[in-house]
Amino acid sequence: MYRDAILKKFDPRLDNILFILHELQDNNPQHYLANADIEKCADYLNIPYSYVHGVVTFYSMFSLKPRGRYIIRLCDSPPCHLMGSESLLDYLKKKLKVDVGKTTADGVFTLEITSCLGICGVAPALMMNEEMIGNLTPERVDTVLEERRQTS
Amino acid sequence: MNIVRNHVLISIDAGTLMSGARAVEDALVKEIVKQGLDKEVSVLETGSIGITGRGVILVVYPEGIYYADVTPDDVPELVEEHLLKGRPLTRLILTETPKRTIITKEKTGLLKEQPRIVLKNCGFIDPENIDEYIAAGGYEGIAKVLQTMTSEDVVAEIKSSGLLGRGGAGFPTGMKWDFAIKTPGDEKFVICNADEGEPGTFKDRLILEGDPHKLIEGMLIAGYAIHGTRGFVYIRGEYSLSIERIEKAILDARAYGLLGKNILESNFSFDIVVMKGAGAYVCGEETALIESLEGKRGHPRNKPPFPINAGLWGKPTLVNNVETLANISEIIRNGAEWYKGYGTEKCSGTKVFTILGHVATPGLVETEMGTTLKDIIFEYGGGIKNGKTFKGALVGGAAGAFLGPDMLNVKMDFVNLKEYSAALGSGAILVMNEDTDMVDMLKSVLHFFKHESCGHCVPCRLGTARLVELIDDIAASKAKKEDIDQLLEITRVMKDSSFCPLGQSVTLPVSSALKYFKNEFMSRVTS
């Protein structure tokens, strides 16, 4: 039912599609766009399911797969790369025991990589859901992960 | 009335928020009340002051003392020592105080400090308070335009200022506006391109977070100049604080009658909405951005027709970058002649640069166009970190060029860099020290392009994939000498045949890396 409430906030115009998809995804506890989300959106805007699917898969912030409570998006663009993001990625993979794009067995973390987040002054950096975290070291990663694990 | 003797400015931007600025702010307000100073000391929020990586930053006025890395635990001592007893807390003072001015080298070779233009208010005013913007001279530009200038006058003024678009391509803004005004249409749109995605660039974010009304005023003036009816700010989805601040600024401006119908009781009506992107670098390209705004996949369009003739929903559309629009109100208020007093003959005004990587003080600076790379890195960036030496810089983001040490004296502006087959681009300067592996850096750049290629055209889709295969082999010392030639050949073909600037620009980092650091590449391959 919450889906209808979200849709009602927007006029059924095509240029609202990104707003609608963002909000549907944000309100899904698993941070993804389920079949039902895409169907609802397509019906509401009176466009084919395939069209919505096409839009969703174009933009990297949207996911078709269920994700963890926290989405870790580690930047791997040149500024963060220069400051050591590649070894941090290895560290994160080992620590979380997952590959890029996968979710930990307990469903707490999903590991993703992203392009530049625009906080390069504190590279290497990552985004944890809506929060930016910079000046990363393996120790800082440990602390951040531990804090999140405890609150979930 | 209370006489406030101290103002404490707390910088609230993406960087300080992640260091816990809100907790420090709360502690500060509570402590000030606790020590009975709440009638004498006021705490104000402001945008970024241009220093990054130093935690939560506070500035205490009138002394103008900067504190860095402040934690809630420091607050009681800070309030007691500085605000109660008047003794600045030396252990937290930021010694390398950011320069609130632009430094220019006059013909005499002497350094001279001048006020900022684009970042004038950033870190000074509360970006969420429209009255502070107005008190700083804000919205005077649009008032002047509405009362004393015709649309043609405005376009002529911008043309004469010599302002070049700050999004990266450096196209003359006045000329674009001139095309827009001459294009017939019952409805015309102004789009602000705030889809800042060029790696190493965050100037637009700091303008949006630090002085959102300046952008609104720039869009209003642009709207008036081209007979526009509606404006759109397209912001990348990751910039949540920017979105929040610009949305608040729009609501406030509307409440003051600065947006909406009959602005300042004139015949001019204009309104602005914010659109949120969803993570696609290619949407920084203006036609891809328009597609995305219309609710489609962000594939670039064929040009011509240019957006100025047929843009959003097929109507004439002016697309300008955030920094470009942030220059407009100052040009109108002070005049084109004043603006031309800054920068070089062919490239007037100032540029906001972001300095990153192996420098002592990463952050952003506003300098005159034509400032040398050396001055930017050593005067503003504090030189190379840990006493190392300079090896090279990647200037203009991933779609920019590598520059070697012999290019340190190059003057940084759109026209001059082009002569050296480089580009000013977005103004990102990624500094690399002697220990940097240039093959590895180019690898990172090419992986970025492969990830961000939208897949619309074959040369870019397949080209970026093949480039990544080649550079991975070179980096792993598994390649032959011919593979380096092939890198260049692929980027040359991509430059000639790719559909949009994304694929066309890959040649820049590849050819420049091979120009300045060829030996490093050669040492990794077998002949």
Image (cartoon, rainbow, N blue to C red):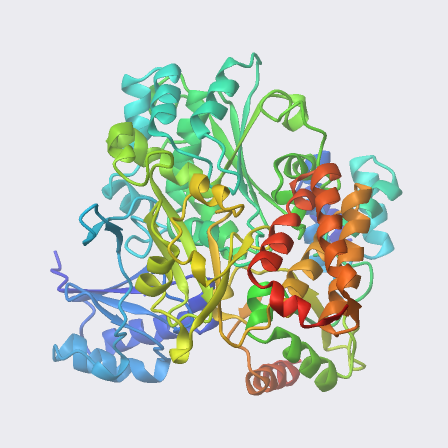
Which quarter of the figure has residue B53? bottom left
Identify the residue shown where x is 38% and y is 37%: B347
Judged left or right of residue B397, residue B388 is left
Residue A88 location in percent, x, y?
64, 79
Q: Nearer the viewer, residue B353 or B67?
A: B353
| In this view, B11 is above or below B372 | below
The answer to whether one can see residue A128 in this image is no
Q: Nearer the viewer, residue B335 or B31?
A: B335
Image quadrant of residue B362? bottom left
Quarter of the figure with the N terminus of chain B: bottom left
Which quadrant, please, contains the C terminus of chain B?
Answer: bottom right
| Residue B99 visible to the viewer | yes
Nearest the viewer among B359 and B8 is B359
Identify which residue is drawn at 52% across, 43% down.
B168
Q: Tell me which residue sits at (40%, 58%) in the image.
A: B408
Q: Is residue B150 above or below residue B12?
A: above
Q: Residue B106 appears at what percent x and percent y?
A: 21, 47
Total marks placed: 0
Along the viewing direction, whichever of B332 and B468 lies nearer the viewer: B468
Q: Can you give x and y, in whole percent of width and height, for residue B66 in the image?
A: 25, 70
Q: Is residue B256 above or below residue B58?
A: above
